[in-house]
Amino acid sequence: MIIDGHVHIGIGNFFHMKADADQLLRLADKVGIDKLFVTELNSLFYDMSEGNDRLARDVAAHPDRFIGYCSVPTPRFGPRVVDEIRRCREKYGFRGVKIYSHPEAPITEPATYPLLEVAAEYGMPILSHTTPDECDHLMQHVPQARLVMAHMGGHPYAFGDWHRAVAVAKKHPNLLLDTASSQIDNGMLEWAVAELGPERILYGSDMPLLDPFTQMAKVTGASLDDQAKSLIRGGNLQRLLRLS
């Protein structure tokens, strides 16, 4: 099973990003992706609950293809964010949490900790576009959380920052990395697997912002054995989410 762990649906306020369910499924079918782990852009930038409600309708319409992230903006919304995660899990069965880190509300603030704690309580992985140092801070405070560092900690902060991402991940067994990024440094994936093992790496495309074809090529073209590639392309998420 191939699972894309980093997908956006809806309309975003950057890069003119826009995609509906049909567009995403057409892209997935061309690449051979079985399931999409999806975050709703409206939740991150406009209305948290409305966006998650929209995503729930898309998941209900395509239950064999879509898996829902409960998408939440700045943790400064406090208890509202925790309540929204509980609502998404208990009402809709969403399987993960997506946090967006705004410059005016750093994700390292203590307000983030309850969010991570409730996600860990439900066994929901947390996808976040954060730097390696931010992830290091969060894992020190909530080590039981399963945090996924998007873009291997690099894009768009600094090319090559994946070296730091891998070093931080070695300190925290519950910290995982996803492959979604516009950077494709030679040997990046092979080195990460050598340092962490393939079980700590998740395939993600960041579609529709990035091309899922090139994102998949980073995995299929890597100098890794078939078992490692299978884990990265979906086996790891299948295990984490307990998918059959």
Image (cartoon, rainbow, N blue to C red):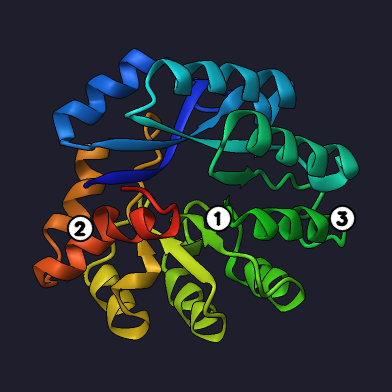
- The amino acid marked with disc number 1 is Pro
Task: Work out whether residue 122 can be spotted.
Answer: yes
- The amino acid marked with disc number 3 is Ala
Q: Is residue 60 above or below residue 176?
A: above
Q: CA distance from mark 3 to mark 2?
A: 36 Å
**Kind of element beneath mark 3:** loop
Rendering coords of residue 149 (x, y %): 52, 60
**Kind of element beneath mark 1:** loop
Residue denoted by label 3: 111
Rendering coords of residue 114 (x, y %): 82, 57
Rendering coords of residue 98 (x, y %): 60, 44
Rendering coords of residue 49 (x, y %): 73, 24
Q: Is residue 179 left or right of residue 74?
A: left
Of the image marks 1 and 2, the number of the one nearer the N terminus:
1
Which quarter of the figure has residue 227? bottom left
Within 10 Å of disc 2 (Cα), the crowding (few <14, some 14-19, many 20+) is some
The residue lying toward the viewer, choosing from 231 and 155, is: 231
Residue denoted by label 2: 219
Residue denoted by label 1: 125
- Circle 3/circle 2 CB separation < 8 Å: no
